[in-house]
Each structure stands twice: as C-alpha cells, then as structure tokens.
C-alpha cells in the first residue's frame, strides 16, 4: 500500500496518509529516535547523515538530507506538541533555534502527525498546514509531498528489518 496524498481545494493543507504493518509504539519510535530516522527519512537515494532530536514541546529536531552528488539540505524544526505515541506537532524553525518558541518568527509550515493503531497496524496521518493555498501548491510543485511519500516507502522497508 502506498501513501495517499490529498490536497483539499479550499484549505492550504497537504494530507499524507499511510498504513504500516507494525505496532504504533514502534512506528512512533521510528519517527522520534535518531537511531531509526536516519534509515528512512528523505526520498529514495538520499541519506540522513545528521539527525538530532530533543523530543519535547519546545525541543529541536535538526537533520541534514544528503542527495546523490553530495548536495545537502539542512532542516530545523521545533516541536510544539509531543503526545507519545499518538501525536506530534512541529513547525519550521531557523537553524539557530535555541528552544525559545516565543522568539520564533511566524511559521511557514506546521505539521501534525497522528498515529492510530488497529489490529497491529498503524495508520499515520500527516497534516501539513501552510500559510496559503499558493504556498501549498508551490511546495507540491517542488516535490515536498512526493519526498515525504518516498520516505514513508523507505520506512515500510526499514520496519521489516526490526
């Protein structure tokens, strides 16, 4: 089963839905422990040579995706909510983010990830909210949703090794 990507016509959202053949606790851990994240985060062909996670509201998630040819893409996020193993909410943050949520500039992108378990399987629904439909459409055009979907494909394969 592949990811389902939905772009509501009237809201600046990207919805990415995927079911994993693994228990929720394990899937949540894969999303929140750098030991696991480095094995699947990013599109096919990319690696994640840097991943640091401070898993708490106000905590920082910093990672670097490296692409074939050596190009690197550093990303920093700030956790807004952590409700293990059910929900994560994080937003974009500048690279020098130090844990002070109140000092952050307005968010460009806020992601809510919900983990729901049924019969030993886990549904992961990522809701990405942008500031406008135009911003959303630009991110889709740049390959954001497909990149996330490919990372989830990689997670399916990684879970088989655990």
Image (spheres, rainbow, N blue to C red):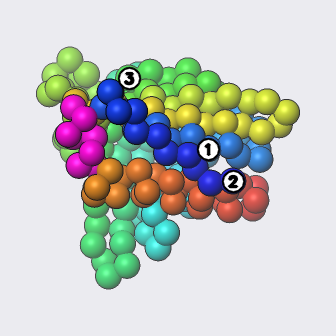
Q: Earlier in the sequence, mark 3 or mark 2?
A: 2
Residue 38 seen anywhere in this rendered image of the structure: no
Other-residue count near label 1 (Cα within 10 Å), few / some / many at <14 / 14–19 / ≥20: some
* Residue displayed at 62% across by 44% down: 18
Q: Position of residue 17 (x, y in %)?
A: 57, 40
The mark found on residue 80 in the picture is 3
Magenta residues span: 132-139
Magenta stretch encompasses residue 78: no
Q: Is residue 123 left or right of residue 162?
A: left
Secondary structure at numbered mark 2? loop
Secondary structure at numbered mark 3? strand
Secondary structure at numbered mark 1? strand
Q: Is residue 81 above or below residue 156?
A: above
Q: Earlier in the sequence, mark 3 or mark 1?
A: 1
Q: CA distance from mark 1 to mark 2?
A: 8 Å
Other-residue count near label 2 (Cα within 10 Å), few / some / many at <14 / 14–19 / ≥20: few
* Residue displayed at 21% across by 32% down: 132
Q: Is residue 71 above or below residue 69?
A: above
Magenta stretch encompasses residue 133: yes
Q: Dots 1 and 2: beta carbons under 8 Å? A: yes
Q: Earlier in the sequence, mark 1 or mark 2?
A: 2
* Residue displayed at 68% across by 43% down: 19
The mark found on residue 18 in the picture is 1
Q: Which residue is mark 2?
A: 1
Residue 81, by quadrant, is top left
Q: Is residue 17 left or right of residue 98?
A: right
Q: CA distance from mark 3 to mark 2?
A: 30 Å
Q: Main secondary structure of the magenta part?
A: helix
Q: Residue furthest front?
A: 9
Q: Residue furthest bottom?
A: 69
């Amino acid at each position: 089963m592949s990811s389902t990507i939905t772009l509501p016509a009237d809201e600046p959202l990207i919805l990415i839905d995927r079911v994993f053949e693994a228990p929720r606790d394990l899937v949540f851990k894969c999303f929140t422990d750098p030991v696991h994240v480095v094995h699947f985060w990013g599109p096919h062909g990319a690696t994640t040579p840097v991943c640091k996670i401070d898993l708490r509201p106000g905590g920082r998630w910093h990672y670097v995706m490296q692409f074939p040819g050596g190009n690197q893409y550093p990303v920093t996020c700030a956790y807004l909510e952590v409700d293990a193993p059910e929900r994560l909410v994080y937003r974009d943050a500048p690279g020098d983010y130090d844990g002070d949520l109140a000092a952050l500039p307005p968010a460009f992108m806020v992601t809510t990830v919900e983990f729901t378990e049924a019969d030993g399987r886990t549904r992961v629904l990522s809701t990405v909210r942008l500031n406008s439909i135009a911003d959303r459409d630009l991110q889709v055009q740049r390959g954001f949703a497909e990149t996330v979907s490919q990372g989830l494909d990689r997670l399916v394969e990684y879970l088989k090794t655990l």
